[in-house]
Amino acid sequence: MIRIGMMGLGTVGSGVFSILAKHGENIARKVGCDLVIDKVLVQEKDKNRGVMVDSALLTDRPADLLDDPAIQLVVELIGGENPAYQFIVDALKRGKSVVTANKLVVAKYGQELFRLARDNRVNISYEGSVAGGIPVIRPLKESFAANRVEKILGILNGTTNYILSKMSKDGQEFETALQEAQAYGYAERDPSSDLSGLDAAYKIAILASIAFETFVDVNSIYVEGIEGIELEDIDIAAELGYVIKLLAIAKNEQDGLDIRVHPAFVAKDHPLALVNDQYNAIYLHGDAVNDVMSYGRGAGQMPTASAVVADMIQVGKDICQQRVDTLNFHFPVEQTLKNINMVENSYYLRLQVNDQPGVLAQITKVLGDNKVSLASVIQKHKLTPVVPIILVTHRVKEEAVNKSIKMLKQLPDVIAINNLIRVEAL
Amino acid sequence: MIRIGMMGLGTVGSGVFSILAKHGENIARKVGCDLVIDKVLVQEKDKNRGVMVDSALLTDRPADLLDDPAIQLVVELIGGENPAYQFIVDALKRGKSVVTANKLVVAKYGQELFRLARDNRVNISYEGSVAGGIPVIRPLKESFAANRVEKILGILNGTTNYILSKMSKDGQEFETALQEAQAYGYAERDPSSDLSGLDAAYKIAILASIAFETFVDVNSIYVEGIEGIELEDIDIAAELGYVIKLLAIAKNEQDGLDIRVHPAFVAKDHPLALVNDQYNAIYLHGDAVNDVMSYGRGAGQMPTASAVVADMIQVGKDICQQRVDTLNFHFPVEQTLKNINMVENSYYLRLQVNDQPGVLAQITKVLGDNKVSLASVIQKHKLTPVVPIILVTHRVKEEAVNKSIKMLKQLPDVIAINNLIRVEAL
């Protein structure tokens, strides 16, 4: 029997309980030992949770779990940085294995935690931290182990994907789509971490660290959210044969790692373009396996609980067999990321200009001076003094685009640069 | 160091060599020991293979591998039933672990081989046997271990998917598409096992056995190939909002396992409808994880070699650590499959009838008498004495449809029943 201390009894925690209640016997066979949740750390012991958890298991004192030598596995489902991070550290130091779904803690403190696990001869697993029920951490470590992973493109945030899908499919404005997402529970009351791209950045940092066998500092990732995307951009994208997605991108290139999160034009016949609503997807290119994509529910109670219990089974198996898989951890040197200025892309640029003769010539001259060449230009006829111009560039370094934009802003007839969106070559 | 005996040096075998040559150092770190291919069993030692394999490794005597106690791992890449099956048995009996990509042998003899592996305290892995580079066997065993898998829908045969895609997208006739597939090397010279659905049947038998924790006898699976699909069916499907795919279906239902392989109408907005050309996909529903889909190259040299080497790494890890994972094998009783007559579906039925008043009434009466109700009827006006009628039924037991067809054939104005295709509820 393996005694488990669970931390947190929110949505995912209740899901874990319900899976163990439903499939406990089958799970015990797979583990080789019974998995028994012995104590559950909660903030308020007496809160009515509507979950069928024996109240005798509940405690509000972390030491009840951490200092109990009988507990061999801690399942951390509190989320957020602290106290979750400290609890995980304490658990590992006391020789307890850890299963967590905490993307923030793994992205930020992964290296330290993996070292602690190795040094204390225990395990730490975190499949639930990225893309909910879609298997991705384990496949990266095992199924694609014979590959040099060259590229990962992820739709890793369900909230922003839901909003962009609604804007794209139903013509909803950003605000309306966000409110709907909140009403359905796909977006949190404070959605800033989702909207800003930070949530996706944690996740791609975790995936890139595994895939490229390095440690990616999440703070060095270029991150841009979807707050600036307007319905007009989405409509023009559609006209040009694209949809706009918040992509988490990680490329292992000759001249360095290119890791970033931002909205991007995705060609509408690419499999990622079809990942809609709250779904997530991970598209991967390996030198042997070529292109592979996985798709599913990237969050939610039961999909995430499915990943957490899968980890509990694998870690439980090792505990049951008194075995430690120290090969699980590898500590390469940290690699510096490519600066976003050095990244090459095509760019979509939407401007508002005075409807004057020669404006387009002025704009194209600025671009030409910076060696930015154009793939397409759309100037729509409108009976207004101010008209939109849409430019799509050929592939060029971001540096040149930024320089151009600075200069464009100084042209008297350029009223506004509405948006700059990268067109991702897939 | 782990000494490996490889059997077969065809396409996939060469791919394995090239991966080991390219990533050997990294792979050794993951395994914890060097993986060294010590001997390679081939039919003709002196054939020029254009592969950079030291000819001193080659042998045409199976005993050189099987009777060498230093060889701890046999990688079987011969394919086909015999001698591959016998070699695997011999290897396991001699205490050697086995990695294979042989779907036929695993589907047919899986239970026996797993028992042999367990009894001899070795391992047998076969990720490469289904869907090439797409991870599916390991995810089913590990990532979805906390689920009751309720449904698997697979596009598991690249040849037939290529042909159906070409028919559907380019309006090619079956024969033309097949010839093109052969020219590109997507179809074998004798494509009968692919076209007949048998290849997909082996694969779904393997997946269903793992997912439903049983042993599915491939001979009891209902199998229907794509030979009868005409361009006209594909066009009408498109009109009705569907594409035709060769689906491998496995459902774990209250009243038994429903496992079958046949062409099916797939709604054109379902993710499986978008899996085209030689790509494969596995769509799975688990009670916790909900819907998950994986997509990628289902065959080919490097994708399959990627899966084989991933298995070699995992099995190698166990050998290196002198560990046996006996929990890997589970031997439940075999379950009887639902007879196809008892399966419920909607059906598409294409008939040719004399253009006479009252024909449709006769037909609908036969269907009504058998309690088959209609969802749609298409009768196209043509200036010919014989006209097509297309019927789509509501969900009904196949029994009733078969009975109806027998009776329809006896109607004097029914010239032919061109096709009956199941409409899969996804």
Image: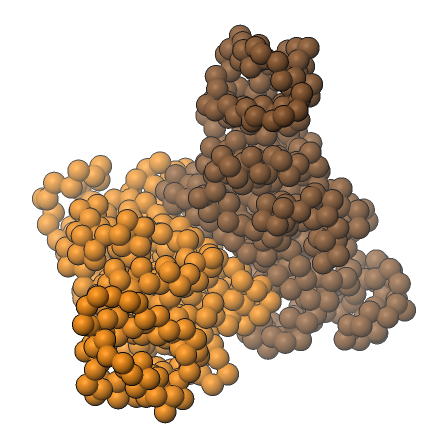
Chain colours: A orange, B brown
Q: x, y (%) of residue B55? A: 84, 73
Residue A65 or residue A186, whichever sits in front: A186
Q: x, y (%) of residue B380? A: 56, 27
Visible in this render: residue B141? no
Question: Considering only vertical position in the picture, is A28 above or below B30?
Answer: above
Residue A175 or residue B136, whichever sits in front: A175
Residue A250 or residue A110, whichever sits in front: A250
Q: x, y (%) of residue A95? A: 33, 64
Image point (84%, 74%), residue name: B56
Image point (70%, 70%), residue name: B17
Tell me where residue A23 sits by quadrant: top left
Q: Is residue A79 left or right of residue B251?
A: left
Question: Considering only vertical position in the picture, is A34 above or below B363?
Answer: below
Q: Is residue B220 left or right of residue B208?
A: right
Q: Is residue A150 left or right of residue A363?
A: right
Question: Considering only vertical position in the picture, is A261 above or below B393?
Answer: below
Image point (21%, 66%), residue name: A383
Visible in this render: residue A153? yes
Q: x, y (%) of residue B266? A: 51, 38
Q: Is residue A228 left or right of residue B255?
A: left
Image point (19%, 68%), residue name: A384
